[in-house]
Image (cartoon, rainbow, N blue to C red):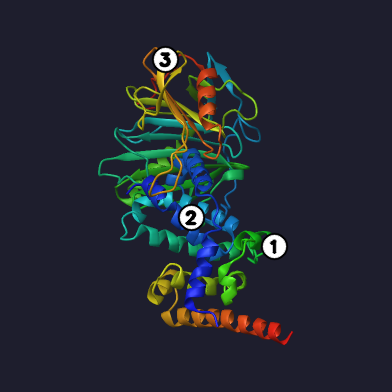
Amino acid sequence: MTSETDVRQAFERIAGAAADPDRLRAKVTARIRTHRQRRALLISAGTAVGAAAVGVPAFLWLGREPKTYPVGEGISLPLHVRPTWIPDGTVAHSRAVNHVSPLWESQLFATPGFDSNPQTVVVPGSVGVLIYVEDLSGAQPLGGAPSTDVNGSPAVVASTRESTTSVQWTLADGLIATVSAIAAIDPDARLQMALRVARGLVTDGLTSVAIALRFADMDDPAFTTVEVGGTPDNWRQQLVSPRASATLTSTRPQGGDGEPATIRGRSGTVAAGGQVGHDTGLTTPPQLRVQLDDGRWLWVQAVDLSDTGGRDLVIEIAETMTIGPNPDLSWLGRGV
Amino acid sequence: MTFDEFLAHRLRSLLHFATVVTCDPDLAEDVLQEVLIRAYDRWRRISAVEQPEAYVKRMVVNEYISWRRRSARVVTIDGEALARLVPPEPDPAAATGGGDDLVARIARLTPRQRVVVAMRYYDDRTDAEIAETLGCSEVTVRGHAAKALAALRVDMLAERSVGHDL
């Protein structure tokens, strides 16, 4: 007869066959990094939006990937929507483009000090508006039936958190737009805020996201996401690839120091990764930090924690990547 | 506790729990990955509850059950997965009638039966806590547990009888 002890021991054996937690953490971290804004603000739902496009302008990148435009020594990617109205007191907070499938772009406008991190409580007076455009291959449609319209296109309305209201509609075949208003205000007022931003979007191609960074290997897809955010005095420019992320910042990146190393002729630090926490059993990622001649900081992190050559990888990336002059960042902290 | 801190401290435990519930290391990794992405979205709310880990485990159970419903994936232990669950080296438990056979039988329980016995004997949860996780009554939990334990015992007795007869 099987005893309860036998059952407990059997479960322990099954648990012992679990996958590598480092590998899972790397996957989760990469997904969160890539999609953190959308993950923070969109509802996961299983039903598709049945809205059809009516009377909306065609988008330049519909049906094809956006091109990269070398500017100086960095990268510039066009954003294809631009708001003509944003709530009073809000300013440009960040822009991001993912240029490999699933294609998406985002812009966040917010009051100073606003934090889009979902762990942060939205305080009274704090307002944020996220404009998100994505293709259907990676879309997370809001559930429910259309209850309003955006310039004639049926739109679905949903509240994701107690302080967020989202409006989603089909811009054109295969292209979905979502405007989320985040504010601790009356839900009706929040909906009107989201709708006014949505109805004011234009497609004149005058907005882009540009960074000073470029990986040496521009093939095989060398980068997936470009993001710029912060304020005029405390900004960050980030380039993400499947294997590593490189971030250029105005201030020293947070985190541990690592071993001293000479990187791009400057004194920096490299942490090889692989340190296993006593209580966690998890491995830290290889990463390096170095302050450049002009005072900017470069921070490179490996994505794949199981990459045994992670230390060499981040050094190689830092040494070989192109770092140009800052692009125009004057839009940070400005209105429309 | 931030999400990163939670991940750093509890990921291994959660992965073991998901593996026990699913009896499939690959599926456990997939299920837990989806759960953690959603947990990140809701972390402000989850971190405010008394036991965030218990909350996430509940998400794992629900995701696993709904995953099967969505994909109509029949979670059975194939040869490859079973080989990973049952190491080839000699197992002392086998001498007492446990070990590999018992692991295989646990893997063949229905998902709800396995969730119940896993939460009861691996996670040391009370029937009330299991009932809350599954969204059913304690009576139902005890019913699942009784059937699961009976299946484990009856099946093993049957095989032993066959072996003895041979």
Residue B75, horizontal then vertical, whole percent: 63, 65
In this rendered view, identify the residue nearer to me: B93 or A135: B93
Residue B21 position within the rendered picture, expressed as x and y whole percent measured from the top left: 52, 65
- Disc on res. B35: 2
Judged from the image, the secondary structure of the residue bearing numbered disc 1 is helix
| Place of residue A19 in the rendered image (x, y in percent of width and height, measured from the top left) | 55, 53
Q: What residue did someone put label 1 on?
A: B79
For the point 48% across and 35% down, which residue is it? A106
Three-letter code for the amino acid on which mark 2 is drawn:
Val
Give the amino acid type for the residue marked by disc 3 in the picture. Arg
Q: Is residue B86 above or below residue A222?
A: below
Chain under disc 1 = B
Tell me which corner region of the image, top left, top right, bottom left or bottom right, holds residue A59.
Answer: top right
SS at mark 2? helix
Label 2 and label 1 in one chain:
yes
Q: Nearer the viewer, residue B90 or A183?
A: B90
Disc 3: host chain = A
Note whether residue A83 is visible.
no
Is A166 located above or below residue B103 in the figure?
above
User: Which mark sits nearer the N-terminus, 2 or 1?
Assistant: 2
Contact (Cβ within 8 Å) of mark 2 with mark 3: no
Q: Name the residue under label 3.
A: A266
| Of A109 and A58, the residue lying toward us | A109
Q: Is residue A285 visible?
A: yes
